[in-house]
Amino acid sequence: MLAASPPFPKEQPLGYEMLSDEPVFDPARHLALEPPANLWRLADLGYSEDEIRRSASKVAVAGPFRVLSEAGVAAARSTALDLKTSRVFGDRTASYVSGGVYRSKFLRDLCNCPLVAEFVSEIAGCEVLPHNMPSQQLYINYAPEDVERAVDSWHVDSIGLDYVLLLNDPQSFSGGRFQFFHGTSHEAARFLETDIGNLTSATVKDLPAERVITPVFPAAGYAIFQQGSLVMHRATRLNQRAERITFVTGFVARDVNYPDPTRNRVAGWDEPGIIAEFARHKAWLSRQKLDAFIEEVRLGATSSDIAARLRDCLADAISAIDILKASSRQG
């Protein structure tokens, strides 16, 4: 069941302002898409057949691979620097800007470029779309001023699929390396002595060095694809202060038959419009399933079978209602 992207919201969330003077995205000039050098599957990390079966992509990590040309790197870096004054500081990710596609037309067009989605689909082994929660289409991460802090501590993501794109020459800074754990999230939780549900949060503990892989980025403009909700990853601290900027670009699988990896906790994040985004996302999932139900339901099906199928179709939207009701009571 392959879904199409929902329309981009007509309304700009309060609190976001678009840049007024920025480059115009041109795929022919700004992209330089090249296939990944390496690929690790979920099975390579130790995930079970049942866990793999529930994932639209069977790929855990792939890369590095080139995304941007030199002109693309220059334009993306310039835009990221223009947005740096809007950054916030967190416990896990030291310094970041959220909602990049609400702040920059260049970034919106980059993240929603069909060529990029097709390219990432080939890497993931499943058709993907830009995440239909626009706030999750792009985060910009900056290096912290305090070099004692990790750029981003060990964690899994709250969305399923993304790539981490480096905008600086890796030779221009020391430390600050992207790393991932060669193992399952269940193993990571045991090593870190925490519950698996806490893996999206900051941690000061470390994972066994012999189980950690550090991909080598050849240059600026290269990225690592990951199934971020299942792959434990981090960016280490810098050895000295330097500019280090990355884009984290999120996607969803077009096949909505797979369980939604977007965690419910995102509905409670302090970002403008995110509650409505979350509701749209869940409604999108239910609508796609209802459309398939209308086309496929057998006229001779029993009432119990039909009721069960309808419940499955509506489950995502109903879960959003329950989460929003709980949120309003807490508020």
Image (tube, helix red, strand yellow):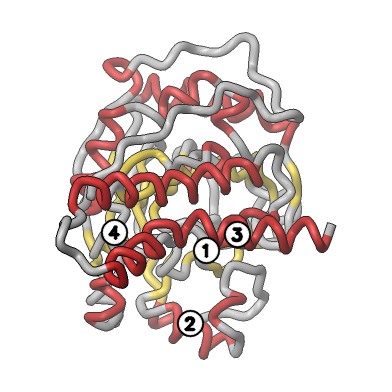
In contact (CB < 8 Å): disc 3 and disc 4: no
Q: Which mark is residue 257?
A: 4
**Residue situated in front as seen by the camera: 324 or 248:** 324
Task: Using the rendered view, name the quadrant where residue 297 is placed.
Answer: bottom left
Q: Which residue is mark 3?
A: 152
In contact (CB < 8 Å): disc 1 and disc 3: yes
Q: Earlier in the sequence, mark 3 or mark 4?
A: 3
Q: Earlier in the sequence, mark 1 or mark 3?
A: 3
Q: Quadrant of the C terminus?
A: bottom right
Q: Which residue is mark 2?
A: 188
Question: Residue at image x 54%, y 53%?
Answer: 174
Left or right, 278 with reference to 26? right
Q: Is residue 173 above or below residue 189?
A: above
Q: Which one is in front in this view, the residue at disc 4 or the one at disc 1? A: 4
**Which amino acid type is shown beneath numbered disc 1?**
Arg
Q: Which one is in front in this view, the residue at disc 2 or the one at disc 1? A: 2
Question: Does dot 2 land on a helix, a strand or a loop?
Answer: helix
Q: Earlier in the sequence, mark 2 or mark 1?
A: 2
**Residue situated in front as seen by the camera: 238 or 167:** 167
Q: How many residues crowd around disc 1 within 10 Å: few (fewer than 14), some, or many (20 or more)?
A: many
Q: Which mark is residue 234?
A: 1
**Distance between the alpha carbons at the discs numbered 2 and 4:** 28 Å
**Which amino acid type is shown beneath numbered disc 2?**
Ala
Question: Residue at image x 22%, y 60%?
Answer: 39
Question: Residue at image x 60%, y 28%?
Answer: 102
**Residue situated in front as seen by the camera: 181 or 162:** 162
Q: Is residue 316 above or below residue 204?
A: above
Q: Earlier in the sequence, mark 3 or mark 2?
A: 3
Question: Does dot 4 land on a helix, a strand or a loop?
Answer: loop
